Amino acid sequence: MTNQRRPLGPLDSLDQTLGCRHSNPNICKNNATPNKCAFVREDGVCLTPPKSWKRIFQELGGHLE
């Protein structure tokens, strides 16, 4: 299972994800950006999910608010 498809958790929303949900984090323009990237934030939350996240969020059972 890829990180994109792991089950939703309580910190996952349309605006943020727990951990990185990019298919290839190495090419993410925000990789290692302070205060945005899960890899460098102490809480492990990504504040810049990929553009495809809205669709993936819905497929994983998330509800649009």
Image: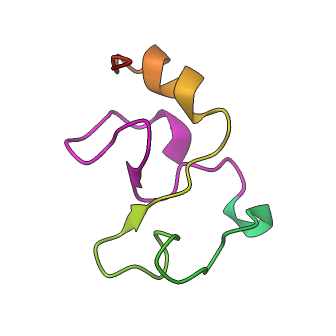
Relative vertical location of residue 5 with respect to residue 31 in this rendering, above or below = above
Residue reaching furthest to the left: 10
Q: In the image, residue 50 lies at what x, y percent?
A: 64, 45
* Residue displayed at 41% across by 21% down: 60
Q: Which residues are magenta?
A: 1-24
Residue 29 pos. (x, y %): 76, 66
Position of 44 relative to 9 (above/below): below
Q: Is residue 11 magenta?
A: yes
* Residue 63 shows in this picture: yes
Point 40% across, 50% down: residue: 17
Residue appearing at x 56%, y 56% in the figure: 48
Q: In the rendered view, does 9 fall on the left or right side of 39? A: left
Relative to 58, is 30 on the left or the right? right
- State whether residue 2 appears in this view: no
Please give left or right for residue 30 compared with residue 38 in the image.
right
Classify 17 as above or below 32.
above
The verdict on residue 21 being magenta is yes
Residue 51 in the image: x percent, y percent? Answer: 68, 38
Residue occupying the far right of the picture: 27
Residue 1 x, y percent position in the rendering: 51, 37
Side (left or right) of 64 relative to 32: left
Identify the main secondary structure in magenta.
Answer: loop
Write down the quadrant of residue 63 in the picture. Answer: top left
Q: In which quarter of the view is residue 32 placed? A: bottom right
